[in-house]
Image (tube, rainbow, N blue to C red):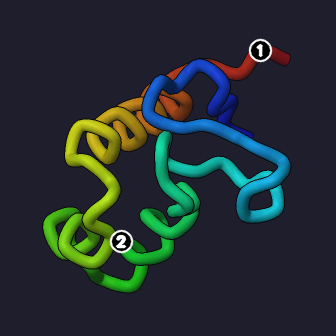
Amino acid sequence: MTDWSTCPAVERNPRKISGAWAFTGTRVPVYALFENLESGATVQQFLEWFPDVKEWQVTAVLKHETEYFRTPVLP
């Protein structure tokens, strides 16, 4: 599971969207990005559909997730 607490593009507030991780300053959950990408949307489409999310935030989230998968798991 990704540790989103170190990603500056997201925040978690128990009073917003049931405490799900969201793009900072929005009510757009991070999982919405991944669901849309998985369904075939492009980053540009996502940004058009969710105008409150900034491109730097999407870039930071994707980079953060990529770094998570590069981190070796120790036995």
Label 2 Cα crowd, 10 Å radius (few <14 / some 14-19 / many 20+): some
21 horizontally vs 29: left or right: right
Extreme bottom residue here?
Answer: 39
Mark closer to the chain start, 2 or 1: 2
Check disc 2 and report its element: helix, strand or loop. helix
Query: Which residue is identified by label 2?
Result: 37
Quarter that holds the C terminus: top right
Asked if disc 2 and disc 1 are in contact, CB closer than 8 Å, the reply is no
Extreme top residue here?
Answer: 74
Quarter that holds the N terminus: top right
Residue 36, placed above or below residue 8: below
Residue 25, placed above or below residue 29: above
Q: Amino acid at mark 1?
A: Leu
How many numbered marks does the figure carry? 2
Residue 9, position in %: x, y?
44, 33
Displayed quadrant of residue 12: top right
75 horizontally vs 9: left or right: right
Q: Nearer the viewer, residue 64 or 9?
A: 9
> Residue sitting at 19 percent across and 73 percent down?
48
Q: Amino acid at mark 2?
A: Leu
Query: Which residue is identified by label 1?
Result: 74
Check disc 1 and report its element: helix, strand or loop. loop
